[in-house]
């Protein structure tokens, strides 16, 4: 059915739920799992002060590249521990939704899994919502899992 599955993560609890669903489905189908995370590089001196001012659920936006690589390594380890044999990770600079869409297109994935966070009420109409943007612009099927 699906030979390749892509999931995005920012290290948040809701993203971890989406990653867990992706791992379970990839394991059940014997599919290749691809995990992507986006980052915005910030000078180290600004990073320290920015982390203090940013809400917890948005901290992923200011993670330096090394933090994203560690996050992806952790997600890859989880997938391998749970029996997924083919796992590939991608750290991309820029917008999270664009990173997911770019990797999906480049790798010709067959399914993207995203969490539903940001799709309730009026916010579902905002183009800035990652699940909304991905679901409307994906080059393949999209599974939106309930993470909240």
Image: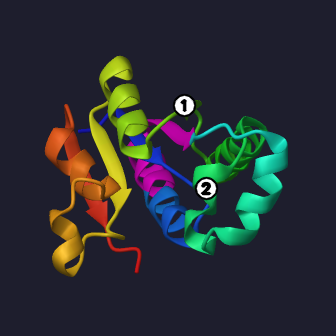
The answer to which image quadrant residue 109 occupies is top left
Identify the residue at horizontal 32%, vertical 70% (top origin).
Answer: 118
Q: Secondary structure at mark 1?
A: strand
User: Residue 87: in sight, yes or no?
Assistant: no
Percent x, y of residue 52: 75, 69
Whole-angstrom CA distance, mark 2 to mark 1, is: 12 Å
Identify the residue at horizontal 21%, vertical 61% (top origin).
Answer: 126
User: Residue 94: in sight, yes or no?
Assistant: yes
Determine whether, in the image, residue 145 is placed left or right of residue 89: left
The residue that mark 2 highlights is 60
Residue 114 vertical placement versus 116 (above, below): above
Percent x, y of residue 67: 75, 45
Determine whether, in the image, residue 99 is placed left or right of residue 12: left
Q: Secondary structure at mark 2?
A: helix
**Residue closer to the observer: 145 or 121:** 121
Magenta stretch contains residue 25:
yes
Write the start and end of the magenta stretch as one range: 22-38
Residue 65 tag number: none
**Residue closer to the observer: 130 or 109:** 130
Magenta stretch contains residue 78:
no
* Figure coloring: rainbow
Check the image and name the residue furthest to the top. Answer: 106
Residue 92 tag number: 1
For the C terminus, which image quadrant? bottom left
Percent x, y of residue 10: 56, 54
For the N terminus, which image quadrant? top left
User: Circle 2: is it few (<14), some (14-19), or many (20+) Cα within 10 Å?
Assistant: many
């Amino acid at each position: 059915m699906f030979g390749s599955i892509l999931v995005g993560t920012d290290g948040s609890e809701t993203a971890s739920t989406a990653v867990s669903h992706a791992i379970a489905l990839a394991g059940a189908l014997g599919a290749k799992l691809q995990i992507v995370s986006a980052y915005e590089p910030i000078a180290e001196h600004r990073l320290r002060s920015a982390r203090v001012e940013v809400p917890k659920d948005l901290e992923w936006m200011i993670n330096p590249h090394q933090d994203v690589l560690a996050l992806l390594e952790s997600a890859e380890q989880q997938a391998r521990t749970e029996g997924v044999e083919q796992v590939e990770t991608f750290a991309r600079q820029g917008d999270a939704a664009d990173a997911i869409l770019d990797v999906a297109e480049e790798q010709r994935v067959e399914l993207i899994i995203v969490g539903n966070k940001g799709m309730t009420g009026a916010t579902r109409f905002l183009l800035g919502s990652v699940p909304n943007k991905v679901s409307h612009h994906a080059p393949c099927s999209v599974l939106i899992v309930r993470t909240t």
